[in-house]
Amino acid sequence: MDAAMSSYAVSGLNISQSNTSKFRHKFSLRACELPCRSSLCSNANGRTFHNSHLDLPIQNRNLVGKTFCAAEAWIHPLSSTESHSHVEEEKVGVLLLNLGGPETLHDVQPFLYNLFADPDIIRLPRLFRFLQRPLAKLISTLRAPKSKEGYASIGGGSPLRKITDEQADALKLALEAKKVAANVYVAMRYWHPFTEEAIKQDKINKLVVLPLYPQYSISTTGSSVRVLQDLFREDKILSRLPVAIIQSWYQRGGYVKSMADLIEKELQNFASTEEVMIFFSAHGVPVTYVRDAGDPYKDQMEDCIYLIMQELKARGINNDHKLAYQSRVGPVQWLKPYTDEVLVDLGKQGVKSLLAVPVSFVSEHIETLEEIDMEYKELALESGIENWGRVPALGCTSTFITDLADAVIEAMPSASAMTTSTTDGSFNQDPVGYAIKMLLGSFLAFVVLLAFPAFKNQIV
């Protein structure tokens, strides 16, 4: 299984420009405890930097209390600062948001620290927020050995950065084919690269933010956008930049068609295609995200599966299908049903052929290459499933990239200066007070984990 939410949280966003452009700044974000090797060492916030009810479509379901739409672009209200003159030559930037991943085994523990230090991943009550970083340090240290084994099994590091760079290059070419000249940047949430300087040096005057997460979750798109808002608020140039954010895009026809194309192609590898169970495995989130925080992820995921299956049915493919959630960690309840439990049940029910479809991911990484291809495949075969197949991630599939280009173009007119809310100031405190809280938090975190060995076992 991947490192923690496995691949889903620190103190920052990491950005670089696509290698098709002149500028390529490679900084990486670390939390404040880690060594700093850059002139962008710290800021006021304490960051340090260095280099199944699937029968109905979502609109017919009860979404009371949901505050996020299955969106097109998020249009920011105009701030008091006027946007750039329309007379200026338009210089468009596209910022791809992704999770990031350790590129070497040495990177695993600090990557995990970044992940668990994100308050959108481990959601502590305000009174206990001072425990965030000590807990992140402890959990990342405990999980690192097991996570290193997983990364070692797929070659010693995550391929996510390389694939995302390739997607950025492909998107730039797709935009050029549509007569839109744009610089494409990559921003990783928990690892390399980081820079806002490339955007400023390229004199971008309009930015479209495109998360590479088809469905919105507060732990993915939400977390990255929050950090992006912090960065823009702290920078006078970026705070005036017109921005459009594409919140989610799972419902776009090009994405749905691309997923259906891949499924249809992989089904041909089975002797009896009509008997194959189409098994969608999505990254899970804790139930509290949906129940208490109003995360639309579950609804959007179910609607996504509905749309893909409708496209397949239009092609005459009427296979049975299941949706389950993978990568849970810790003692709390996550979205159900769980992937591993469903695979065992399907084997008991006599299912002999299964096609796994990773539906949260547009790039190959540890959750597809190790968790699905190794752990879940082995479990499925042990459970009585005889024929196993897996749909590849979308990667640079042409129909997918072309649709992303269309999404960018459609979002451009909505760009306006980003307005940001103030933070709670939990990290803006005097150094002595911060040091005391860190020491106290470290001690309490250590006591908690020693007192609850079952919780410790769930983490590691």
Image: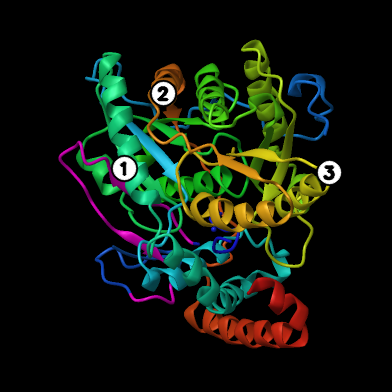
Q: Is residue 9 left or right of residue 306?
A: left
Q: Residue furthest front?
A: 271
Q: Using the image as rendered, state which of residue 316 and residue 364 is in the foreground.
A: 316
Residue in the image at 70% along x and 37% along y: 296
Label 1 to label 3: alpha-carbon separation: 42 Å
In this view of the protein, can residue 191 be seen by the observer?
A: yes
**Residue 77 image offset from top left, x and y in percent:** 53, 28
Q: Secondary structure at mark 3?
A: loop
Relative image position of residue 145 (x, y in whole percent): 51, 77
**Amino acid type, mark 2:** Val
Q: Position of residue 361 (x, y in %)?
A: 53, 41
With 127 as the anchor, is 120 left or right in this view? left
Mark 2 or 3, nearer chain start: 3
Query: What is the quadrant of the C terminus in the image?
Result: bottom right
Q: Is residue 362 above or below residue 311?
A: below
Residue bearing the label numbered 2:
408
Q: Is residue 398 left or right of residue 313?
A: left
Report which residue position mark 3 lands on: 349
- Dot 1 falls on a residue whose secondary structure is helix
Of tags 2 and 1, the one toward the viewer is 1
Q: Label 3 crowding class (10 Å Cα cut-off): few <14, some 14-19, many 20+? A: few
In magenta, the rendered stretch is: 11-35
Bin the neighbour count of mark 1 within 10 Å (Cα to Cα): few under 14, some 14-19, many 20 and up: many
